[in-house]
């Protein structure tokens, strides 16, 4: 079952986060852009309110939460109802699939990546933005997720775990970017991304469909 209840009842709080922590949001956006390939048709899975898709030029999305879909559509995005494990698109529909802070909410991550592989054209790319469970913030989120309305039922992953699942789903040629090197609340408000992983709490993984 999609974990939409917190996003339905706290949708305004979710969207307000990007304003309260604008520097963090911009830092994450920069990290995604660092690995963003050129593309003709992209889709964000778990598009939320469209905070990443819109500035990245991705015009389509999948989102199970009606309230989130409504906000994303107000941003001019084409959003359909659906979940990551059963994408409502034909085979070979896109050359880019994006996940940002979404994988911790899906029920079956391998199935989600297999679906992404299916809807991508041969040679298309997947980008996954995530908080690494082994990072500074990841350890805090994991320890305190019971206190957070959004992360209470989340499953956090390490970068290596996600890479292994992507490989099993049929992806190759992995590249990495990272940001958020300090504490979310007391660290620098905006940071430039670096290639690689293991230092930053927010990691972006890019892989190509085999």
Image (cartoon, rainbow, N blue to C red):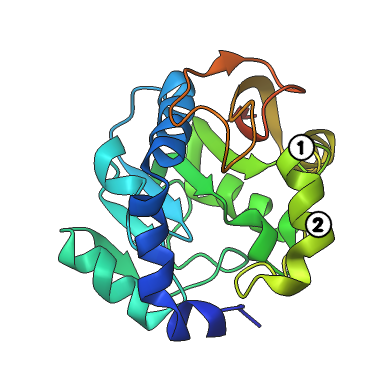
Report x, y in % for residue 52. 36, 46
Q: Nearer the viewer, residue 5 or 93?
A: 5
Query: 69 above or below 160?
Result: below
Residue that appears at 57% across and 14% down:
194
Pick the quarter of the image with the C terminus: top right
The mark found on residue 106 in the picture is none
- Which residue is labeled 1 in the image? 136
Query: 115 above or below 148?
Result: above
- Which residue is labeled 2 in the image? 142
Quick check: can you spot residue 69? Answer: yes
The part of the image, by quadrant, that contains residue 164 is top right
Report x, y in % for residue 120. 49, 42
**Most distant residue in the front direction:** 186
Q: Is residue 45 left or right of residue 159?
A: left
Pick the quarter of the image with the N terminus: bottom right
Badge 2 density bin: few <14, some 14–19, many ≥20, Cα 10 Å: some
Residue that appears at 15% across and 58% down:
76
**Most distant residue in the top direction:** 195
Q: Nearer the viewer, residue 156 or 79?
A: 156
The part of the image, by quadrant, that contains residue 74 is bottom left
Q: Nearer the viewer, residue 113 or 144?
A: 144
The secondary element bearing badge 2 is classed as helix
Residue that appears at 22% across and 58% down:
77
Residue that appears at 40% across and 43% down:
94
Quick check: can you spot residue 156? Answer: no
The secondary element bearing badge 1 is classed as helix
The part of the image, by quadrant, that contains residue 58 is top left
Report x, y in % for residue 31. 49, 26
Q: CA distance from mark 1 to mark 2?
A: 10 Å
Q: Of callouts 1 and 2, which one flags the residue occurring earlier in the amino acid sequence?
A: 1
Q: Is residue 135 left or right of residue 181?
A: right
């Amino acid at each position: 079952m999609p974990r939409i209840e917190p996003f339905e009842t706290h949708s305004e709080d979710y969207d307000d986060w990007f304003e309260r922590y604008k520097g963090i949001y911009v830092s994450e956006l920069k990290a995604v852009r660092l690995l963003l390939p050129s593309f003709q048709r992209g889709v964000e899975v778990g598009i939320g309110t469209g905070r990443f898709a819109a500035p990245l030029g991705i015009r389509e999305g999948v989102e199970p939460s009606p309230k989130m879909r409504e906000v994303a559509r107000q941003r001019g995005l084409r959003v359909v109802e659906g979940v990551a494990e059963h994408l409502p698109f034909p085979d070979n529909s896109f050359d880019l699939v994006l996940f940002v802070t979404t994988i911790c909410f899906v029920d079956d991550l391998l199935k989600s990546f297999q679906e992404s592989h299916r809807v991508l054209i041969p040679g298309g790319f997947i980008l996954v933005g995530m908080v690494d469970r082994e990072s500074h913030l990841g350890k805090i989120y994991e320890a305190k997720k019971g206190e957070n309305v959004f992360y209470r039922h989340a499953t956090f992953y390490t970068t290596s775990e996600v890479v292994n699942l992507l490989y099993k789903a049929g992806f190759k040629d992995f590249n990495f970017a990272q940001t958020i090197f300090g504490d979310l609340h007391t660290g620098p408000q905006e940071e430039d991304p670096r290639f690689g992983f293991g230092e930053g709490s927010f990691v972006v993984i890019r892989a190509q469909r085999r």
